[in-house]
């Protein structure tokens, strides 16, 4: 996966638009893991900004569903991993 830590927010947001749903969801899961590893998350953190941008991309892609498609993807992935 691309290292997005070194890119601007604009480039990151543009990359999100080009991603497949699967790629976007995988990135969101990775960002959540990275955020949990931090002591505190603040609006000035790159990870925080990337999470906000990824959430916005998901919500634009699935209007009116908020993050439900992402949560459904997570549940399918957990079920698949347990099988």
Image: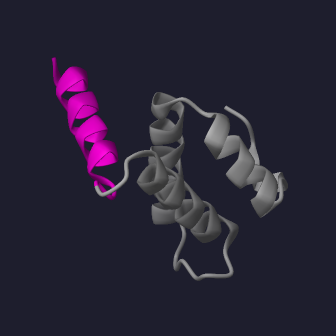
Q: Position of residue 74 (x, y in %)?
A: 29, 39
Q: Which residue corresponds to the image point at 26% horizontal and 51% vertical from the top-left?
A: 68
Number of callouts: 0
Q: Is residue 3 left or right of residue 72?
A: right
Decide: is 53 above or below 20: below
Scheme by which the image is coloured: one colour
Q: Is residue 71 magenta?
A: yes
Quadrant for the C terminus, please.
top left
Q: Position of residue 29 (x, y in %)?
A: 44, 46
Q: Which residue corresponds to the image point at 52% horizontal and 76% vertical from the top-left?
A: 39
Decide: is 13 above or below 17: below
Decide: is 38 above or below 62: below
Most common secondary structure along the magenta stretch: helix
The magenta region covers: 65-83
Decide: is 79 above or below 65: above
Q: Nearest the camera: 83 or 19?
A: 19
Q: Position of residue 38 (x, y in %)?
A: 54, 69
Q: Which residue corresponds to the image point at 37% horizontal and 53% vertical from the top-left?
A: 63
Residue at the top extreme of this rendering = 83
Q: Nearest the camera: 47 or 67?
A: 67
Quadrant for the N terminus, please.
top right
Q: Is residue 65 left or right of residue 83?
A: right
Residue at the front extreme of this rendering = 63
Q: Is residue 54 left or right of residue 6?
A: left
Q: Which residue corresponds to the image point at 54% horizontal and 29% vertical from the top-left?
A: 20
Q: Is residue 81 magenta?
A: yes
Q: Nearest the camera: 37 or 46?
A: 46
Find residue 18 and report its image quarter: top right
């Amino acid at each position: 996966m691309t290292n997005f830590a070194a890119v601007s927010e604009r480039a990151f947001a543009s990359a999100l638009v080009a991603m497949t749903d699967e790629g976007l969801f995988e990135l969101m899961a990775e960002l959540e893991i990275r955020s949990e590893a931090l002591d505190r998350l603040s609006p000035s953190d790159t990870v925080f900004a990337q999470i906000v941008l990824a959430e916005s991309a998901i919500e634009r892609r699935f209007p009116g569903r908020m993050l439900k498609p992402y949560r459904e993807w997570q549940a399918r992935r957990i079920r698949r991993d347990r099988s």
